[in-house]
Amino acid sequence: MQSKGAVNTKLKKDDKVQVIAGKDKGKIGKVMKVLKKKNRAVVENINIAKVHERPTQANPQGGITEKPMPIEYSNIMIMCNHCMKPTRVGMKILENNKKVRFCKKCNEQIDA
């Protein structure tokens, strides 16, 4: 039996991703936070939940607010900046020993 651990993902903060499964399928958003140990990412305007908050000093009004919840890595794909399609990501080592991500569809570099 395999142990449940963090998956080695090639996802980073501020990456543009597309949802490929679930209620928000087809939507595109920006990664706000990566939760490596839980194999999830929080994406802007994706998987929005209504959260009931009690009044506090920071929010004296309280009430119901909308909050983006984490989504599983397997349900999102990174978008290539060059071909503008959801793609798998590969790793490449350049001549100056710098590790960069590249698009498997068009072979263009994802990292700036």
Image: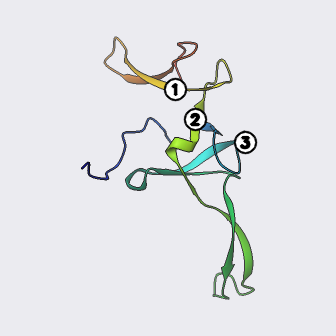
Provide the secondary structure element on which disc 1 rests: loop
Provide the secondary structure element on which disc 3 rests: loop
Q: Is residue 14 at least partly visible in the picture?
A: no
In this view, the residue in front, 17 or 60, is: 17
Dots 3 and 2: beta carbons under 8 Å? no
Could you tell me the amino acid type at mark 3?
A: Lys
Question: From mark 3 to mark 2, how far is it between C-alphas?
Answer: 11 Å
Residue 57 coordinates in the image, percent (x, y) = 63, 87
The residue labelled by disc 2 is 77
Residue 89 coordinates in the image, percent (x, y) = 48, 26
The residue labelled by disc 3 is 27
Could you tell me the amino acid type at mark 2?
A: Met
Q: Residue at x 66, y 51 (%)?
A: 44
Q: Quadrant of residue 70?
A: bottom right
Dots 1 and 2: beta carbons under 8 Å? yes
Describe residue 7's horizontal placement relative to residue 60 as left or right. left
The residue labelled by disc 1 is 88
Which class describes the residues within 10 Å of circle 3: few (<14), some (14-19), or many (20+)? some
Q: Residue at x 57, y 43 (%)?
A: 75
Q: Residue at x 31, y 18 (%)?
A: 97
Describe residue 89's horizontal placement relative to residue 14 as left or right. left
Could you tell me the amino acid type at mark 1?
A: Arg
Provide the secondary structure element on which disc 2 rests: strand
Q: Quadrant of residue 54?
A: bottom right
Q: How many marks?
A: 3
Q: Is residue 19 above or below residue 93?
A: below
